[in-house]
Image (spheres, rainbow, N blue to C red):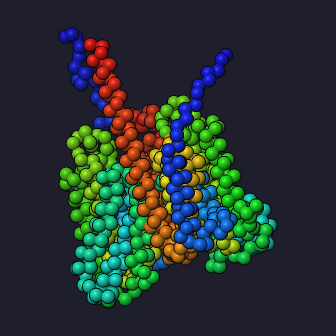
Amino acid sequence: MTTAKNIETASPPRQDLRARPRWTWLVRRREILVSAAIVVVVAASTAVHPYFWSSSNIAFIFADSVVIAFLALGESFVMLGRGIDLSVGAIMGLSAIVVGFQIQNHNMTLLPAVLLGALVGIVLGLGNAVLVGVVRLPPIIATLGTLSVYSGLEFVVTNGNQVDTIPSSITNLGSDTVLPGIPVILLLTLPFVLVSALVLRHTRFGRSIYAVGDDAEAAYRAGIGVQRVLFATYAISGLLSGLGGVAFLIYTSGASSTTGVGDNLTAIAAAIIGGTALTGGVGGAVGALVGSVFLTVTLTALSFVHVADVWQPAGVGVLVLLAVVYDSRSRRGSVAWRPRKRQRQRQSQRGTR
Amino acid sequence: MTTLELPRRWRVPAWGLALLVAIVAELCYFTLTTRQFAGHGTGMLALSEQFAPTGVLAMGLAMVILTGNIDLSCGASASLAAVIAGTILEKGGSPVEAILLAVAVSTLFGLFNGVIVAYVGIDSLLVTLATQFIITSIATSVAGASPPFGFPGAFTLIGQGAVNDVPIALWVFLVIALAIIVTVGHTNVGRSMTLIGYNLRAAQYAGIPIRRTLTAVFTLCGAAAGVAGVLLAAYYNSAQPDIGTDLLLPAITAVILGGMDIFGGRGRIGEVVLAVFLLGYLSQGMLIEGDSSLSITMVTGLVLIGALVLKFAFERNLRQRLTARMQRLRTLSRGARS
């Protein structure tokens, strides 16, 4: 027995632990990569069309991306926990309608409006949260059902009317700028992004979302209340979508029974472009903002080079495909992912480097 | 060499029976409450041509979901097929030409989805999310500012005509449904689909041609979307570029309500057919009663959630009871041994 070696000291040093070259974090962090892409697109568009780099156009791009940013932010929380929320657009629309009617008919001011929007969002989000976290339906089914229910509710609440007279004291927030190119509404959005980023990165709750999304079984064994974490992510997603509804009111100064119908998939697209993986455990809050700004910048650039508006959805689709093909993580566990061959390749690459 | 004759395991299709009871109850309710619903029996059949396209779409989707994937782009594919068929007819092409080309184009997009999912290896939710956007754009741009409408009678007959009081659209749906039931239940390809959805690793080790099967499934789903699009254009006698996109969610709802497991490998196509009829008659009955289409969406969502909550609660109870019994048996046998 004395001849048996201690396995840990006997095993050769592991190849995987060798440090990567210093610069790779630049490419590996999706937020930075997408920001660089934004710079490239902006530079190219400005070269073609000088008006692109004007304060009013930049302010427009930022204001335009705020609504999707809120939805993508909520979607990120859910996707980090390996879920999906198909109902964010409907929650956004419903909140915009409820708040809009209050503003229109009862002269509600901004602060109560934001609180009401948050309340509507969190109540609707709790519907998803109960279905996924308590009843344990698969997220895609649960949110598909609530999507139908909420978009039906939108119609019931509007009763055929629509919101169209929002006082300029509120809509000015969408058009006024603090500095040239920075609209007020962006400044109102940033705190939410920062708080989300801090919560995700530096709190026990945030880390447990990543843990659950990465491997729910392992998280459960590590003592994390998996269902409780999932419950919270859907409630947060609802809350942020409700706030997105208020942002929508400020930006477009109106809402109807079909508001937000097509925004579910766009929000998911923005989150994916921002680096949040559908397979959970990878991504972040800043990525959601950067992803939605990138989406808006690219679509605006397309319209600047006279691509017809009907091709804008195709632009979104191509961007999603590019983001996904670039991200090799999204292939893990699929048919075409052959671990042995790839690992061998990777090891041989590392050996030569 | 002797072949083993194993008895085929046959389970009582409890979910299908429940759906059947629900359909009968629903038909009775609408017949009693609204006068126009039954229409001497033929009215009920005539209503079915409105949800036959959704049914065809659901058939294609059911196969995709059976393999554990999803196709979000099939609604857009149906729109594209409708628009292409409409454009060809408007330019004076024959109906046969229009139908063949429309189905061919949407089949091609299905093939594209399948190749990317199977050979590049990207999650089908992401791939079809992207292609859904792209196909929508193409459909809108083909349709142009004034979408085609007013087709020749030979074409609209597919969506509005009837043989023996049974609408042609319903015949198309039933034939496709039968073909897919046989394919999934009684052929090698169908078995492979089920195993791929049930356990991908096991399918790999069993030497099943996973990539080819997946590609075939997505291609077939594209073809089904094409047929659904043609039926839609023929029924409405026009081809708006969003004509099929609205059918995506009802089709997914029908598949899930039909007891198909969203993670794949479990479910029966026949039960999905029943769910199509259940949802279709529900929405038609409510429309005749005077409800708006959006409140129908709401009721559909509530039905979906309610049905699945029940189903999951039931299945979980059953599984818990079974595992508890197994454990009791194990402890008993252990006690007997010692």
Q: Provide residue A297's location: percent of width, then percent of height.
A: 43, 71
- Residue occupying the point 71% across, 71% down: B87
Query: Residue B303: percent from the left, percent from the top?
Result: 45, 60
Measuring 48% from the left and 72% from the top, which residue is drawn there?
A: B294
Q: Is residue B116 left or right of residue A197?
A: right
Which percent across, then down, holds residue B46? 67, 66
The answer to which quarter of the image holds residue B31 is bottom right
| Picture quarter with the N terminus of chain B | top right
- Residue B247 seen in the figure: no
Q: Is residue B180 above or below residue B9?
A: below
Work out whether residue B74 or residue B60 is closer to the camera in this orientation and state it: B60
| Quadrant position of the C terminus of chain B in the picture | top left
Up-down relation of residue B71 to residue B183 (above or below): below
Quadrant housing residue B301: bottom left
Residue pictured at 31% horizontal, 69% vertical? A121
> Which one is nearer the viewer's eye here, A229 or A20?
A229
Location of residue B161 with respect to B221 vertically, above or below: below
